[in-house]
Amino acid sequence: MTIQKYELISFKLCPFVQRSVITLKEKDVDFKITYIDLANKPDWFLKISPMGKVPVLKVADTILFESAVINEYLDEVNPPHLHPLDPIRKAHNRAWIEFGSNLLMISYVMSTTKDQEEFEKKRIEFISKLPYLEEQISNGKYFNSDVFSLVDTSYAPLFMRLDLMDKMHKLDLFNDYPKIKNWSNNLLARDSVKDSVVEDFEELYNQFIKKLDGYITK
């Protein structure tokens, strides 16, 4: 295990930061997390974040950004490997991580839109993507059978937010997709996922959606 001390710059509700927190916890790596307000970004953050976004990982004097890049770095230098070692399987997993990022963006619009018509439009768009994902998932606990991987760290934040959205407004997303539903349940039950957010995450998330007057809160 590396003795390098990491500092992860975060926003409490950011799903992309959560991906890296899960990865760090899976590897039992010591790290510090610093939270900022994205609506009032401090000057020191703007100086080190060229895209003005989180996550940012400080590794000594080096700054890394973008969750996929951060997670791959962490995976390379901290055992055990969470990416498949076979090049084609690794590339396949990377592709589906990107697919998950697209689903996160659709779900974000779905959660924050004020309009019922736009909500239904995004819900249908989200569901239209699920047959592709269902076909790729193993029959085991996780994406790659029973082996936890970086794909799982990438989808867990999505499933956590969908679960909270479903409590506000029934989504019925996974009715026809048993493998996705099983995968989601297994990820949400995993300690590294449960411990990857602040204690009052659900309350903060609900407040955020209500503040934006999201349709799902009505």
Image: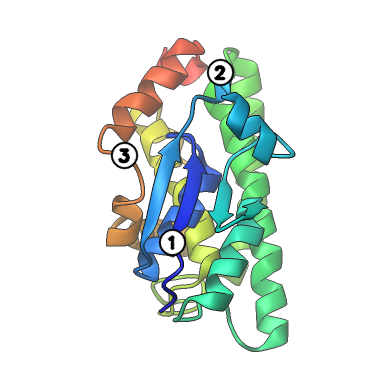
**3 or 2: tag closer to the N-terminus:** 2
Which residue, as the protein is rendered here, is positioned at the far bottom? 86
* Towards the viewer: 89 or 61: 61
- Secondary element under disc 3, as helix, strand or loop, is loop
Query: In the rendering, which numbered label is found on residue 48?
Result: none
Which residue in the protein does label 2 denote? 40
Q: Position of residue 202 (x, y in %)?
A: 31, 32
Q: How packed is label 2: few (under 14 Cα within 10 Å), some, or many (20 or more)? A: few
| Horizontal side of residue 101 vs 192, given as left or right | right
What's the distance in space between the residues labelled 3 and 1, CA to CA? 21 Å
Q: Residue at x 45, y 11 (%)?
A: 211
| Horizontal side of residue 208 vs 200, given as left or right | right
Q: How packed is label 3: few (under 14 Cα within 10 Å), some, or many (20 or more)? A: few
Q: Residue at x 64, y 38 (%)?
A: 105
Q: Position of residue 117 (x, y in %)?
A: 64, 17
Select label 3 or label 2 by which is in front.
2
User: Which color scheme does this rendered protein use?
Assistant: rainbow
Name the quadrant of the C terminus: top left
Q: Position of residue 173 (x, y in %)?
A: 49, 43
Query: In the rendering, which numbered label is found on residue 5?
Result: 1
Tag 3–tag 1 contact (CB < 8 Å): no
Q: Amino acid type of disc 1?
A: Lys
Which residue in the protein does label 3 denote? 198
Q: Amino acid type of disc 3?
A: Val
Instruction: State whether residue 26 appears in this view.
Output: yes
| Horizontal side of residue 8 vs 66, given as left or right | left
What's the distance in space between the residues labelled 2 and 1, CA to CA? 27 Å
Q: Amino acid type of disc 2?
A: Asn
As drawn, 114 above or below 106: above
As drawn, 114 above or below 5: above
